Amino acid sequence: MVYVRKNVSKLSRTERRRFVEALLEVKRRGEYDEFVRLHITHFVGDGDRGLRAAHMTPSFLPWHRMFLLDMEDALRRVDDSVTVPYWDWTRDRRATSLPWTDDLLGGNGRPGDRRVMTGPFAHAAGRWTIRVGFTRGEFLTRDLGRSRSPMSLPTKADLKQALDDPVYDVAPWNSTVSRGFRNKLEGWGRGPDSWRNHNRVHRWVGGAMVGGASVNDPVFWLHHAFVDMQWSRWQQRHRNHRYLPAKPPGRGSDQHRRIVARHERLPPWDLTPDELEDVSKIYRYA
């Protein structure tokens, strides 16, 4: 049966509670930290040699689609009524609106160390200790809107600019391209165009959401569900265009064996981007 991912602002109180409880249970079982480790392992940039599967690469979208599906499976093993909701950051734009409420993800970090003090994921609540990351801190941190250098969330116009591009991606298939839906949505750029869409949201949340260990903040899943929704919207809008590249770059290319082509295996799964383009028999967005 096809299940539904809802806008977080449309969840009932019961749905919010069940989603939070399922997340906390996945954490208690030790499964959640494995998701953090997996994301760190595959957080490979342009400057690193070797294969890029998750970021700065065409497979950014199918990689995170599969990553979301695995988390959703873990949540649904706890409670089969739960799906990952999405956070529409073009509408819910304030640090005091959803999903930053005490009954959902909790609020902003306190001044100084940016430690989250409210909600079920606050360290003081005793059920959300950071065990995998790049610092020794055990508590979740946030800096919503960046207190020292304020910034705003992406707008509908920012998102439209990405959705209007009919080409999925272009050579050299990395963070430097200025054309193509994938990078316009992922959000790499230079100068005034730095930190667009997906990337800008990570920066706006701040704290744990910056860097490879960003999965430590549960808002990661709500953010990426909305990003995944945009891929579905782009597919509906540009039905004659598909994931690119269709074939892997040749031996003479700097990107040879550094990106995943349409029919190549997407690590760490035994699936290809081609197999992840159509999820209509698994879930849909409301």
Image (spheres, rainbow, N blue to C red):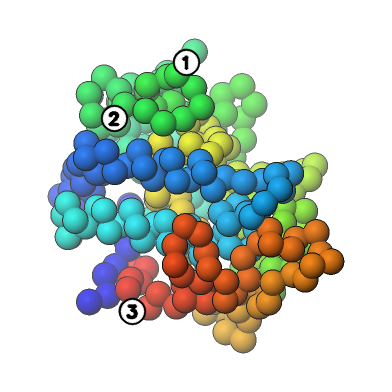
Q: Say which residue appears at 77% left-offset and 71% top-offset.
A: 250
Q: Position of residue 80 (x, y in %)?
A: 17, 60
Q: Label 1 vs label 3: CA separation?
A: 44 Å
Q: Say which residue appears at 64% left-offset and 26% top-offset.
A: 149
Q: Nearer the viewer, residue 3 or 175?
A: 175
Q: Say which residue appears at 69% left-offset and 68% top-offset.
A: 169
Q: Is residue 78 left or right of residue 245?
A: left
| Mark 1 and mark 3 residues within 8 Å of each other at the beta carbon | no
| Mark 3 and mark 2 residues within 8 Å of each other at the beta carbon | no
Dot 2 lies on which element? Answer: loop
Report which residue position mark 3 lands on.
281
Q: Is residue 33 left or right of residue 89?
A: left
Q: What amino acid is at disc 2?
A: Trp
Q: What amino acid is at disc 1?
A: Asp
Q: Nearer the viewer, residue 130 or 272?
A: 272
Residue depth check, mark 1 versus mark 2: number of the one nearer the observer? 2
Residue 239 in sight in this render: yes
Earlier sequence position, callout 1 versus callout 2: 1
In the picture, which quadrant includes the C terminus? bottom left
Q: Which residue occupies the extreme right position in the image?
A: 252
Q: What amino acid is at disc 3?
A: Lys
Within-10-Å neighbours for mark 2: few <14, some 14–19, many 20+? many
Within-10-Å neighbours for mark 3: few <14, some 14–19, many 20+? few
Report which residue position mark 2 lands on.
128
Q: Position of residue 186 (x, y in %)?
A: 61, 54
Q: Which residue occupies the extreme bottom position in the image?
A: 240
Report which residue position mark 1 lands on.
113
Using the image, determine if residue 112 lies above or below residue 25: above
Q: Position of residue 31 (x, y in %)?
A: 29, 43
Earlier sequence position, callout 3 versus callout 2: 2
In the picture, which quadrant includes the N terminus? bottom left
